[in-house]
Image: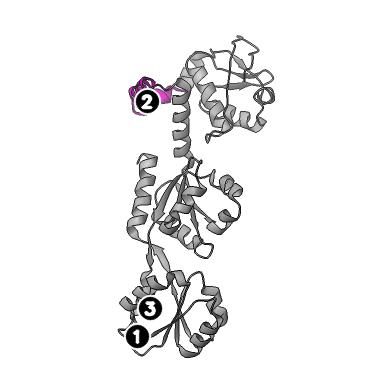
Amino acid sequence: MDFTQKENTVPLQIVLDSDSVVPLYVQLRSRLEYMIGTGFLPSGTQLPSVRELAGQLQIAPTTVQQAYKDLQQKNLLETQRGRGTFVPQLGTQFHKNKELMKPHKMIDTVLFDTVITQSIKQGFSFDDIREAFEERITLRERGIQIVFIGISDAMHKYESLIQASLAGLNAMVSSISIEELRASPKLAQELLSEFDLCVTLLFHFREIQDITAGLSIKSLSLISELSNQTLESLTLLPVDTKIGLVCRDTSFNNYQVIIQRYCPPDQEVLYSDPNDKEAFAYLIKKVSVILHTTVLKDFVQKSASSDIKLIELMHVPNSDSLAKVREYIKATLGK
């Protein structure tokens, strides 16, 4: 997309990528900043009006306005009332930017030159390099957007635990239920395209990889374990406690091992799958404590009498898994 200057006419071509993760106003600001800095837009050059440039580039006027505003704050553009927007005179620009010329505020351009040279040797174009820099700067400015995917009953708990583990880092955690993604693969692609990193539990990891196939989003898995609160509740049960376990058949063996490890020795435990109404009705008549999974919390609370103690088998991500997520975020942000 190109536009023609009104004064000091210079043929220009500005190309914006609407599919890029870099906001359009950042792309436009970067292009204009480069053109001004390299002398492609010399002092005194008049730029199109906000509406004119928006029309030529087929973008919203607010996008152009934001780019112009950012460049004005850097003293790279100035608006003259009744005339328009111009590249300032060189002398004026140096005067306004003299604070930026102090040695302790100058960027070591040798580092940039090294990266650019190495990238060119690897076959990347200037546009490739420019886009990569823009993406990295944008990532630093807005932070890493993380989504936790899990069952609806537990996803907000994991979201808050992950967010707490990333304290001090520029990262924001949201959550989406895996049931919602399963129901609409098309919606899943749209929702997840907004995020930089997907985190899920280990037993959902393969499924999430299939859902995110084709998206430029990294996936990490967490290993979960029973919370200390749950384990303490199990170990404090009296020896003669009559215990019932309510969970899906597929989870029974795992929980049976846990009960044998933490509950009183030789403790008899009655079991029921929630779908077996006869077995469940028998169980709630015989036990004084029911252990249940998070998914079945509402079901058990509605069905069991008030004199039965309920212990939720609450899982949390283990510390090693959270540490790996934190290290990945730090590495991505270059910290």
Disc 3 marks a residue whose amino acid type is: Ser
Q: Nearer the viewer, mark 2 or mark 1?
A: 1
Q: Is residue 184 left or right of residue 55?
A: left
Look at 34% across and 48% down and name the residue there.
327
From the image, state whether disc 3 or disc 1 is nearer to you: 1
What residue is pinned by disc 2?
106
The amino acid on which the numbered mark 1 sits, given as a three-letter code, is Gln
In this rendering, is residue 110 above or below 295? above
Q: Which numbered mark, 2 or 3, is in the foreground of this view?
A: 3
Q: Residues within 10 Å of mark 3 (few under 14, many from 20)?
A: some
Helix, strand, or loop for circle 3? Answer: helix
Residue holding disc 1: 267
Q: Which residue is mark 3?
A: 233
Principal secondary structure, stretch drawn in magenta: helix
Q: Residue at x 38, y 70 (%)?
A: 254
Report, in whole angstroms, how far the alpha carbon at label 2 lies from the one at label 3.
Answer: 59 Å
The kind of residue tagged 2 is Met
Locate the C terminus by quadrant.
Answer: top left
Res 75 seen here:
no
Q: Is residue 281 above or below residue 156?
A: below
Q: Which residue is at a point 50% across and 44% down the rendered structure image?
A: 213
Mark 1 neighbour density, 10 Å: few (under 14) some (14–19) many (20 or more): some
Q: Secondary structure at mark 2?
A: loop
| Residue 75 place in picture, x, y as percent | 52, 24
Magenta-colored span? 97-123
Indicate which disc, 3 or 1, sits on the residue closer to the N terminus.
Answer: 3
Q: Is residue 83 visible?
A: yes
Label 2: how many Cα within 10 Å (few below 14, some 14–19, many 20+): few
